[in-house]
Amino acid sequence: MLDLITNVNNALNGFIWGIPAMTCILGVGLYLAIRTGFLPIRKFGYAMKNTFGRMFQKNTAAEGALTPFQAVCTALSATVGTGNIAGVAGAIAIGGPGAVFWMWISAILGMGTKFAEVTLAVHFRERNKSGDYVGGPMYYIKNGLGKKWMFLAYLYAFFGVCAVFGTGNATQVNTITAAINTALVNYHILNTAAISASNLVIGIVICIIVALILIGGVKRIGSVSEKLVPVMSVMYILLGAGLIVMRFDRVPSVFGSIFQGAFNPAAFTGGIVGSFFISMQKGVSRGIFSNEAGLGTGSIAHACADTKDPAQQGLYGIFEVFMDTIIICTLTALVILLSGIDIPYGQAAGAELTISGLTAVYGNWVSIFTAISMCCFAFSTIVGWGLYGARCAEFLLGSKILLPFNIAYCLICILGATTDLGLIWSISDTFNGFMTVPNLIAIFLLTPVVLRLIKEHFSKQR
């Protein structure tokens, strides 16, 4: 039975992350870039000034809403996670160094896509029965495209619920257990025979903590995210930047392998990875897995922001993709490629490859800091995706489903800690691919609305 599921999923994954997803993601991203006059590039300085420059201003939000800073931290908490660490490592192992180049391309186009997602989510959001703002792809399809397109909204919400248990939960918990166990084994606090018991304990603890946060609703999720995201990001950036300084003499050759490997991966992988399309596919898919531009999930958090200007909140989408992929994913790639470790090209790899890169340069002591950083990354993603899954489930079945969903979501933490997740990673990739299709169709059709909201925003600024 397991072999059948694996074979069916592999076929679906190969299809959805083949021509359909590549066409939708890159095509819609390029279309938006042209229609908006390459807004993320042309107005990049303006976007940074009006996002990062304002993030730490003291604000309070109305009932049932988040401050813009809390909204962006909640979205970042979901995007800045194992995709930045395990996802990048996996992309390089399967697609070669050139996969990093395609991550950058997907990010450059993805900044415009995420801007559109966030802008539409704020513009077409609603209030639910509890008085909270709710929004995201299913709502801008419902309120922006009308009844004849409702099937896309339901498809998106269904795929979202299916994806959230793997992408947002089980794979993240698995990363936490791997990071903690690696640090404990390195310091001889834990022996390999006790790892199974350790995994169960970690899973139960995470289950309880996630339950306490989700019970508090959107306000508590926002409060946790705004404290966790800055700390974890700074910690990881400092570790990565320090490694780059120590191996600075290798930087030119590494960037050469990234640019040349994008079109000739065999030259840098010993012929193991020879397909240009595989390099592009892994780079784009893992880039999307990391920054979520095209998935539409981040817009669900932004829809909760206490703001009256959709395009102003949309600027945070540009900031998110830049921070997530151009900064943090690039740091991870450089950690792996500069460290000099052997990369198992053609084989699945994850967080352990990034950890190996850091310990090869800094020594075993860094595994403690790596474990803390990775735990923060992964835990923040669990919390953020808990909100996304709840919103998708609520759209499908109403508010009565929220308690059963939250219980199931918390219990999955234990499964994620104690199970081999090779197949779950692959299934999560598949559902992520399916989510992009209805979302990007909606963005393409609603582009005139995005253009109008951009015009209104800049008219106010003038």
Image: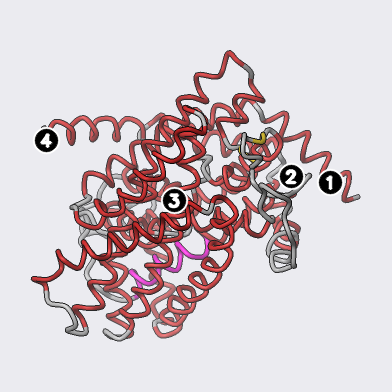
In the rendered image, the vertical position of residue 242 relative to residue 398, given as above or below: below
Residue placed under numbered mark 1 in the picture: 458
Given contact means CB atoms under 8 Å apart, are the residues at marks 2 and 1 in contact? yes
Tell me residue 101's x, y (percent): 44, 55
- According to the picture, the residue beneath numbered tag 4 turns out to be 3
- What kind of residue is marked 1? Phe
Q: Residues within 10 Å of mark 2 (few under 14, many from 20)?
A: many
Labels 3 and 4: the sequence-earlier one: 4
Residue type at mark 2 is Ala
Residue corresponding to mark 3:
287
At numbered mark 2, what does the secondary structure look like: helix, strand or loop?
helix
Q: CA distance from mark 3 to mark 1?
A: 30 Å
Who comes first in sequence, dot 3 or dot 1?
3
For the record, the magenta segment spans 326-338
Separation of residues labelled 4 and 2 (CA atoms): 47 Å
Report whether 455 appears left or right of 430: right
